[in-house]
Image: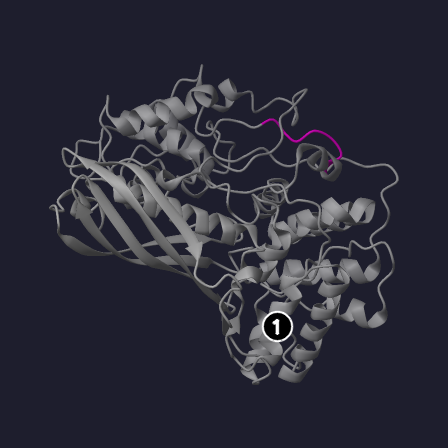
Amino acid sequence: MGPRRENRRDDVIKVETMLGNTGHYDLKKTGGPTGYHGTYLDDAIRRYQGDAGLKVDGLLERRGPTVGSLRRGLGAVLAGYLPPTEREVDDHHERVARGLPGLLVHRPRPLPLRPIPGLPAVPHDVGAANQRTVDHLRTVLDTGDLPLYLATDVTHGGARGVAAVRDLLDLARRDLGADRADDLGTAVLAHLPPDQQRALLGGDPPRALPMGVLVAEAGAGDADTAPGGGAVKPPAGTTVGNPAPAPATASPSPVQPPAAAPSQAAPLSDNDRDAYETPMVLDPEITPEMAEQMLEGQVKMGREFGLKHAPDYLDHYLHGQGKDMVIPRDEARKRDFVRQAEAKNRKRFDESFLNPNHQRTGKLLTKLQDGHKVDLRDDWDYSVGPVGPKEPLMEGDLSHSHLAQGRIDEALATGQSNINSDGHFTAVRHGDIVYIEGTVTHVWKDRYDFEKGKFGADLPLKAKEGGKAHDYNIRAVWQQKVSGSFKISNGRLSEPELVWRDIDPKGPKP
């Protein structure tokens, strides 16, 4: 099946069901499988193919690589289930249109918030902040990093944090509807380890159901939580992690703090409480000067909570006048994602030299004649963000995202960072040895700014509107010398001996 193919409905139903369980096709949006091929399904197929490292053509052959990959990946999830028939799919949509329960599983189970004895009452001011958060969610489709902030409050806020997050979810259910509240709750649980999932829900999370199958076969009518129910997990193909222990804070990027209870043991001062409870929907009377003052309070709180980068970056947003924040090499390398990026890109250079099909290096080296030399240039990019990288899955797994590594401070401080490594080399061949020498310049760049409409962006944008804050670039630049040799035999390189050295042992000046 695929573009300009027959696309039999029974085949389309199978593919919709499989992609609904990988997370690439939203069966909530379609109300379940439909059996009809279109742009939405074609996009989902191509996303899956790209993520799985397959040829991206939108085509599925019965014994082809895409179908094989889906079956291998979903064997444990869909084992024992039959795909719904065309008649069952049509009956399901007819029932849903009439307001009756559908025949197919097209939403996760509702999240049960069971009573928890001894849970403290939510203070009035925290409840008011939660209400402002829910009111703001009415105006946006994207919850942004709100689930992360709420999960952090559960992790570090103890019973007070649990009570405040449950209060927010109850308000969301009342004002936004059960579906939106469950989506938010599921996103929060995806950032929590199993024991903290149980702490928030008051028991085991609901047993996960395979999407797109018959409700009767899935047992969706059973109790919400089967004995020993598994922890809630994000859909396959997405990336989240369990944050390592770190204090919750008002977030500089986005700036808005979670509207749940603060996590520190000591009570907040009046000034800090005002900063913490910044309105989620800005009052028209709030001026850029007032927004600046509130953000100053968040800088103070972040430092009190022990965060380093997030409050510093926000402070520069307020006082740096838009000038670049230049970070010395050794300071940049203290961030493990920068070290990972540098090591990854260095490995890519090393491997490309040996790859006879690599157009910019390996292919030219294998054709190099004795006594001749060639100039080479190559570069590699490594991107990482708060939730996941921009790299395709074929380049490696997604475990280097800030959240997957527990880098809460960096997740709050930076957006999508890019580390580019640009290399210039000269290679010369003498007999069966190719000698190579060159310089690689590593550049880490991140734009510190806020996007209108994103959760938590209102306050910093208000400050910027009045000239009280300015977007800026975070960057670090350093160079390494590369030298070494390869043995060449029958047009192939082997036995690499490459040495990488920092050009300035003390690091370049900012």
The crowding category of the residue bearing disc 1, from other C-alpha atoms within 10 Å (few below 14, some 14 to 19, many at least 20), is many
Q: Is residue 239 above or below residue 440?
A: above
Q: Position of residue 321 (x, y in %)?
A: 55, 82
Q: Position of residue 129 (x, y in %)?
A: 73, 62
Residue at 84% across, 64% down: 268
What amino acid is labelled 1 in the image?
Answer: Leu
Please give the range of residues in magenta. 201-207
Instruction: Based on the picture, tell me whether residue 416 belongs to the magenta stretch.
Output: no
Query: Residue at label 1?
Result: 459
Q: Quick check: can you spot residue 489? A: yes
Residue nearer the viewer, 168 or 429? 429
Residue nearer the viewer, 505 or 219? 505
Prevailing SS of the magenta stretch: loop
Residue at 61% across, 80% down: 319
Residue at the top extreme of this rendering: 80
Q: Is residue 462 above or below residue 190?
A: below
Residue at 65% across, 40% down: 192
Q: Quick check: can you spot residue 84? A: no
| Residue 124 located left or right of residue 48 | right
| Residue 373 located left or right of residue 332 | left
Residue 367, located in which quarter of the rendered image?
top left
Q: Is residue 509 above or below residue 259?
A: below
Residue at 39% across, 48% down: 499
Q: Position of residue 207 (x, y in %)?
A: 60, 26
Residue nearer the viewer, 499 or 365? 499
